[in-house]
Image (cartoon, rainbow, N blue to C red):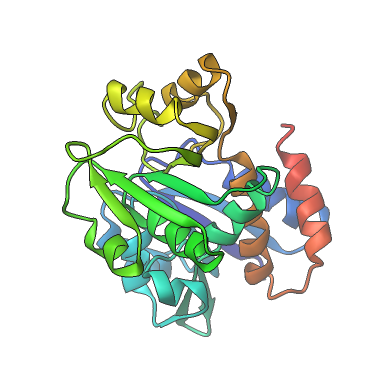
């Protein structure tokens, strides 16, 4: 019987995940298909998952913390951060994982000697990345509009700033994890802050993929080496697909066909 997988998000119409995962299923003759589900209310994730008879799912903004709550069991890195981006249905039990962080480490391999990083935003993706960077003894600062969501980051050892309290510092890498620029032409913080940040970094990355966000456009104008979230998407997608197929397909083969799917 064909398994059904999905991605939940708001928005979700832009997601490349169906193209990536379906390329793997089709080319490797795995009996499954992958669809998009636009979910406004993250608290409905669990009931929607079961109602649709899914075998697994990916979760994108803004539901990654709600996805954590929807699971019966959390494994691996997701336990540490309280953020889930991949769910697998194991005999009616929802098991949650986080493949974002390792996907991002794969994406920034080419940026050498990254010792200190500034993360813009304080949502689920920021939590996963900050925790993963700290594992590698990278110094992490966080800047967010308000104080509200910063306590998690303070507790794990990050230095935190609000837009009002930010003071210019030098960084090896600045990462935007906010959704600014996804559906609009917004910057992730006021322009004077972004200008200051970009004038004091070697590299820039954006978790958003498939478009040159205003943030990346500014980095490009300043001749800073940058990348969008495509490699992060690929990295986390390969790891998620491995979980979906219960490692019955080779990781190298998954990677090959996912990579090819980016050409379409």
**Residue drawn at the location 46% of the way across and 41% of the way down:** 175
Reply above or below: 84 against 107.
Answer: below
**In-image side of 126 versus 86 (left or right):** left
Seen from the viewer's position, the closer of residues 176 and 39 is 176
Q: Position of residue 101 (x, y in %)?
A: 53, 59
**In-image side of 21 versus 117 (left or right):** right
Q: Residue furthest top?
A: 221
**Residue drawn at the location 49% of the way across and 49% of the way down:** 116
Q: Position of residue 10 (x, y in %)?
A: 35, 44
Q: Position of residue 85 (x, y in %)?
A: 47, 61
Reply above or below: 7 against 220.
Answer: below
Asked if residue 164 can be seen in this view, the reply is: yes
Quarter of the figure with the C terminus: top right
Asked if residue 29 can be seen in this view, the reply is: no
Q: How many marks?
A: 0
Seen from the viewer's position, the closer of residues 33 and 160 is 160
**Residue drawn at the location 67% of the way across and 47% of the way down:** 20
Q: Position of residue 87 (x, y in %)?
A: 49, 69
Quarter of the figure with the N terminus: bottom right
**Residue drawn at the location 73% of the way across and 40% of the way down:** 261
**In-image side of 69 versus 126 (left or right):** left
């Amino acid at each position: 019987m064909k398994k059904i997988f999905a991605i939940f998000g708001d928005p979700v119409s832009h997601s490349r995940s169906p193209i990536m995962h379906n390329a793997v299923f089709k080319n490797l003759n795995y009996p499954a298909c992958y669809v998009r589900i636009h979910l406004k209310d993250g608290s409905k994730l669990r009931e929607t998952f079961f109602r649709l008879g899914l075998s697994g799912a990916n979760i994108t903004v803004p539901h990654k913390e709600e996805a954590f709550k929807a699971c019966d069991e959390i494994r691996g890195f997701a336990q540490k951060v309280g953020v889930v981006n991949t769910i697998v249905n194991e005999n009616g039990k929802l098991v949650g994982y986080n493949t974002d962080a390792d996907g991002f480490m794969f994406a920034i391999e080419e940026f050498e000697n990254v010792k200190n990083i500034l993360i813009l935003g304080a949502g689920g993706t920021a939590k996963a990345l900050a925790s993963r960077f700290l594992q590698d003894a990278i110094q992490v600062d966080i800047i967010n509009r308000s104080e509200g969501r910063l306590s998690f980051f303070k507790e794990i050892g990050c230095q935190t700033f609000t837009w009002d309290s930010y003071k210019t510092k030098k960084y090896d890498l600045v990462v935007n994890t906010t959704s600014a620029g996804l559906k609009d032409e917004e910057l992730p913080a006021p322009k004077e802050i972004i200008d200051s940040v970009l004038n004091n970094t070697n590299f820039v990355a954006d978790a958003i993929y498939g478009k040159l966000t205003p943030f990346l456009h500014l980095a490009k104008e300043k001749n800073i080496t940058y990348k969008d979230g495509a490699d992060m998407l690929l990295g986390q997608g390969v790891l998620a697909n491995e979980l979906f197929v219960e490692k019955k397909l080779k990781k190298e083969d998954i990677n090959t066909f996912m990579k090819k799917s980016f050409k379409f």
